[in-house]
Image: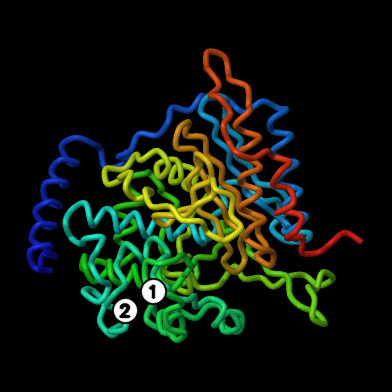
C-alpha cells in the first residue's frame, strides 16, 4: 500500500538530516562524493587519436557541423579531450572547455533524481503521477517509473512547437505549457505496454519530483546529480545560458523543400533552456559529462540500483538484440548512456559498465538525425576499446558487438549536405 504524502515527507526529512550530518563529518564540501574508475594519467596513443579524430571529422562533414567537442576516456590507456573545427563558418576555433546543451542526456539525470528521491522515501517508483501533479486526471494509470522508462504512452511536444522556438528563441517556457502541447494528442498506447521516446514524459516527471520534494528542479539536479559527481560547470538554467563560453549551436535551414546548404545555418545558441526543462535543458561541458556518464554506468552514486536497468525494451522494431532502453538510458552491449537532438546540437554520452571507458561527443548542427551522433559515439567507443594499454596497465578484452566500420552507414545515411 502506498504511504501518505505526509509520512513520506517526514521520512525524507529525517533521512536528509542524517545524510547531511554524515556528509559534513566525512567529506569536504568541494570534493565529489563518488569514486570513478581509476584513469591512467596519459594521453591516448597517437595512432588511436588519429582514428578518433577522423571519425569525428567524418561525422562533422555528414551533419554539416562546423565544430565538435569530444572526450574519450579509456582508464587503462589514456584520454583524448579536444575541440575540433570552428564555432561557425570562418569562426573561432572550438575549445574543449566550451559549454553546450546536454539535450537528451538530461533525461537520464531526471531519472537519477527519481531514484534518489525513491531511495530516501520521498516518492515510490510506482506512484501514479496524479498523486503529485494536479490537472492531469487522464493519467491516473501512469506511474513515475513509466515516465522515466519512456513507457507512459505520452507523445512529444518538441515537434509541435519547433516553429515557435525559432520565431522567439529567448522566450521562457513554463513546464505546464510544454506539458499541454505534449498531452494534446492523448496516449499512444496503454501505459507500460510499449516504448516511445517522449520529451513530454520527462517534463511531467520533473514537475512531479518538484511537487514531491518541495524543491525546484534546478535544486534537485544540483543536489543529486551535479554535486555528487563534481560537475562544477553544469546547471539546469531557466533562461538562455548562452555566453562567450558556449559552443554556438546551429541548424541548417530549408530552400525549395530541401536542406539549404548554400546559406549559413540558423544560430540557435540563444534558445532558452526552459524549452527543454527536465527533458533537454541541462547546460554542461565535456569533462562534466564524461564524469557523469561514468558515474551512471558504473553505479557510483549512493542511490544507483541495478533494478533500474532490469526490464529493457527494444527502442525500435529493427533494433539489434544488444540495443535496448530502460531507466531513462540506452544500453548498447556493455555501454550505458543517452543521445539525442535539441535545436543547435546533437549530443551523445556513453560509458562501459565493466571498464568505465567513456565517450562524449557534441556536434553543433542539429539538422541531421540523432542517429548520426549515436553512431559516432559508438564508433569512438569501438576505437577506444582497442587502445593498447599504457605501461603497467592491462587492456580489457574488447567486447562490443559492433565495429567502427559497421556503424558508418548510420552516419552516412544522416548526411545533410552531400558532397557535390
Q: Is residue 55 above or below residue 242?
A: above
Left or right of 66 on screen, residue 398:
left
Residue 299 in percent (x, y) is at 35, 40
Taking the view exactly as shown, the residue that stands out farthest to the right is: 420
The residue at 34%/58% (across/down) is 221
Q: Which residue is mark 1?
A: 190
The residue closer to the viewer here, 193 or 333, is 193
Q: Nearer the viewer's eye, disc 2 or disc 1?
A: 1
Occupied quadrant, residue 74: top right
Distance in Å between CA atoms under marks 2 and 1: 10 Å
**305 or 401, which lies in front?**
401
**Residue 178 left/right relative to 10:** right
Q: Residue at x 76, y 55 (%)?
A: 412
Residue 23 point in image, percent of width and height: 19, 41
The answer to which of marks 2 and 1 sits earlier in the sequence is 2
Mark 1 closeness class: few <14, some 14–19, many ≥20 residues within 10 Å: few
Is residue 159 shown above or below 89?
A: below
Image check: 358 left or right of 375? left
Question: Which image quarter holds the C terminus?
Answer: bottom right
Say the numbered circle drawn on residue 139: 2
Amino acid at each position: 500500500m502506498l504511504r501518505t504524502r505526509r509520512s513520506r515527507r517526514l521520512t525524507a526529512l529525517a533521512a536528509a538530516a542524517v545524510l547531511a550530518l554524515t556528509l559534513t563529518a566525512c567529506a569536504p564540501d568541494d570534493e565529489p562524493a563518488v569514486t570513478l574508475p581509476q584513469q591512467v594519467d596519459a594521453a591516448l596513443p597517437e595512432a588511436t587519436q588519429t582514428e578518433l579524430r577522423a571519425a569525428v571529422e567524418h561525422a562533422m562533414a555528414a551533419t554539416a557541423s562546423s565544430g565538435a567537442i569530444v572526450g574519450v576516456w579509456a582508464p587503462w590507456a589514456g584520454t583524448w579531450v579536444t575541440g575540433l573545427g570552428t564555432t561557425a563558418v570562418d569562426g573561432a576555433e572550438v575549445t574543449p572547455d566550451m559549454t553546450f546543451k546536454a539535450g537528451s542526456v538530461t533525461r537520464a539525470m531526471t531519472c537519477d533524481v527519481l531514484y534518489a528521491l525513491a531511495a530516501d522515501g520521498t516518492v515510490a517508483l510506482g506512484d501514479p503521477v496524479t498523486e503529485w501533479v494536479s490537472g492531469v486526471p487522464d493519467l491516473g494509470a501512469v506511474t513515475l517509473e513509466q515516465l522515466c522508462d519512456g513507457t507512459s504512452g505520452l507523445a512529444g511536444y518538441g515537434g509541435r512547437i519547433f516553429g515557435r522556438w525559432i520565431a522567439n528563441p529567448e522566450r521562457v517556457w513554463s513546464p505546464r505549457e510544454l506539458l499541454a502541447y505534449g498531452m494534446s494528442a492523448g496516449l499512444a498506447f496503454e501505459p507500460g505496454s510499449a516504448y516511445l521516446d517522449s520529451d513530454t514524459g520527462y517534463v511531467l516527471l520533473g514537475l512531479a519530483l518538484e511537487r514531491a520534494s518541495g524543491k525546484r528542479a534546478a535544486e534537485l539536479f544540483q543536489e543529486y546529480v551535479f554535486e555528487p559527481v563534481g560537475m562544477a560547470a553544469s546547471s539546469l538554467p531557466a533562461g538562455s545560458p548562452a555566453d562567450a563560453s558556449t559552443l554556438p549551436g546551429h541548424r541548417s535551414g530549408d530552400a525549395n523543400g530541401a536542406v539549404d546548404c548554400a546559406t549559413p545555418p540558423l544560430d540557435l545558441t540563444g534558445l532558452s533552456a526552459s524549452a527543454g526543462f527536465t527533458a533537454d535543458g541541462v547546460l554542461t561541458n565535456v569533462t562534466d559529462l564524461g564524469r557523469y556518464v561514468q558515474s551512471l554506468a558504473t553505479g557510483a552514486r549512493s542511490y544507483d540500483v541495478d533494478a533500474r536497468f532490469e526490464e529493457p525494451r527494444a527502442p525500435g522494431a529493427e533494433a539489434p538484440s544488444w540495443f535496448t532502453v530502460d531507466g531513462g538510458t540506452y544500453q548498447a552491449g556493455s555501454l550505458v548512456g543517452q543521445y539525442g537532438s535539441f535545436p543547435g546540437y546533437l549530443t551523445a554520452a556513453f560509458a562501459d559498465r565493466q571498464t568505465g571507458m567513456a565517450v562524449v561527443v557534441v556536434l553543433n548542427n542539429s539538422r541531421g538525425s540523432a542517429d548520426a551522433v549515436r553512431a559516432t559515439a559508438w564508433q569512438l567507443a569501438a576505437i577506444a576499446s582497442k587502445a593498447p594499454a599504457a605501461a603497467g596497465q592491462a587492456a580489457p578484452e574488447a567486447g562490443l558487438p559492433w565495429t567502427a566500420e559497421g556503424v558508418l552507414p548510420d552516419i552516412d545515411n544522416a548526411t545533410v549536405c552531400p558532397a557535390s
